[in-house]
Amino acid sequence: LETLPDDAQVSREERVFRFWINSLGNSTYIDNVFEDLRNGWILLETLDKVSPGIVNWKIANRPPIKLPFKKVENCNQVVKIGKQLKFSLVNIAGNDIVQGNKKLILAYLWQLMRYNILQLLKNLRFHSHGKEITDVDILRWANTKVSDSGSQSRMDSFKDKSLSDGIFFLELLSAVQPRSVNWSLVTKGVTDEQKKMNATYIISIARKLGCSIFLLPEDITEVNQKMILTLTASIMYWFLKQPVEEKPSATSDSENGSQVETISNSTTDDSASESSVE
C-alpha cells in the first residue's frame, strides 16, 4: 500500500523526535515515540533533562507499569509541566498520550524540542545582554550573518519556499565558518534531485561542525517550518558558543551582540515562527 503524504510526514517527524530524545541519554532507548512514550516515564526524564528539577519524582511511577491509571498519572504530570513551560496544550490530557494520539504527541514533542533549543540560546545570555532570544531574533541573526558575508540571499520567514534549494543555509554555514563549504559540491538547486543533494550536504556540514542536527533532507527541500527553525537555531547556538578568537572575523562577536541586542516582545509560539522580518 502506498503511504499517504500525511503518514509520511508523521513518520519523518517521529524519526526526528526519536533521534533527539535518544541523544539526551535517558534510561531507555526508544524505537517508536508513539509506543514507547505512552507510560510517560521517558517524557518525564526528557523534561528533567531539558529543565532540571522541574519533575516531581515523588509522584512519578517507574516502569514496568502494569496499572493503566499509573501511566495516566505520569502523563498528567507531563501535561502539567508543559503548561508550566507555556506550551500550547489546548485539549491535550494525559490520557491522550497514554492512548498514543499521534497528532497530540507530535505537537507536544515539537514544543519541547524547540523549548530545549531556545533554552540553550538563553544560556548564552552574555551575547544578548541578559535578554531572551526569540524566534524572530534567530531569523534576524541568520539574515544578518549572510548579508555581512556579502551575499544577497535572505529568508523572509522559516516557511520561505525559496529555502528549498538549500543555497541560503550553505551561505549561512560559510558565513559562520568560511572553510566549511566546498562550493564545487554545491548544485544550483533547480531540480528535486539537486535540492536534495544540497540539503544532504547542509546536514553533513552542520554535523561535522558539531551542531545538534536532527532534521532530514526532506525537511529542507519541503521547507518544514518547524525543522527549518531548529536548523537555524542550532547553527546560531554553535556559532555563539565558539571562543572569540576562533570566530571567522575579529568583529563577529561585537556584531553578534548588536544583532541580538534588539529583542522583540513577540512570544516564542508558532506565530513568531510564521512572522516575517522586514
Image: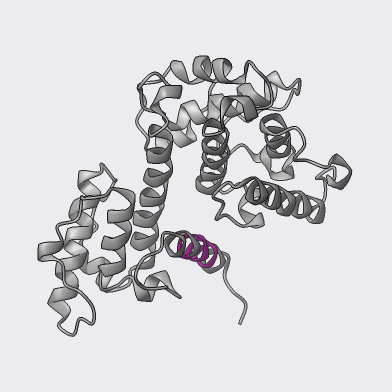
Colour style of the rendered protein structure: one colour
Q: x%, y% of residue 71?
A: 19, 73
Asked whether, in this view, residue 52 is left or right of residue 34, the answer is: left
Q: Which residue occupies 24% across, 58% down?
A: 92
Asked whether, in this view, residue 15 is left or right of residue 193, the answer is: left
Q: Which residue occupies 39% across, 46% down?
A: 116
Vertical position of residue 44 compared to residue 123: above or below: below
Q: Which residue occupies 14% across, 83% down?
A: 67
Count of numbered circles on the image: 0
Asked whether, in this view, residue 141 is left or right of residue 81, the answer is: right
Residue 16 falls inside the magenta stretch = yes
Residue range in magenta is 10-18
Image quarter in which the C terminus is found: top right
Image quarter in which the N terminus is found: bottom right
Q: Which residue occupies 40% across, 20% down?
A: 264
Q: x%, y% of residue 171?
A: 73, 33
Asked whether, in this view, residue 148 is left or right of residue 125, the answer is: right
Query: What main secondary structure does the magenta stretch of the protein show?
Result: helix
In the image, 50 versus 73, the foreground residue is 50
Q: In which quadrant of the rendered view does residue 166 lie?
A: top right
Residue 104 falls inside the magenta stretch = no
Q: x%, y% of residue 79?
A: 22, 56
Q: Residue furthest right?
A: 184
Vertical position of residue 70 compared to residue 105: above or below: below
In the image, 121 versus 6, the foreground residue is 121
Q: In which quadrant of the rendered view does residue 72 lie?
A: bottom left
Q: Residue furthest left?
A: 58
Q: Residue furthest front?
A: 245
Q: x%, y% of residue 11?
A: 52, 68
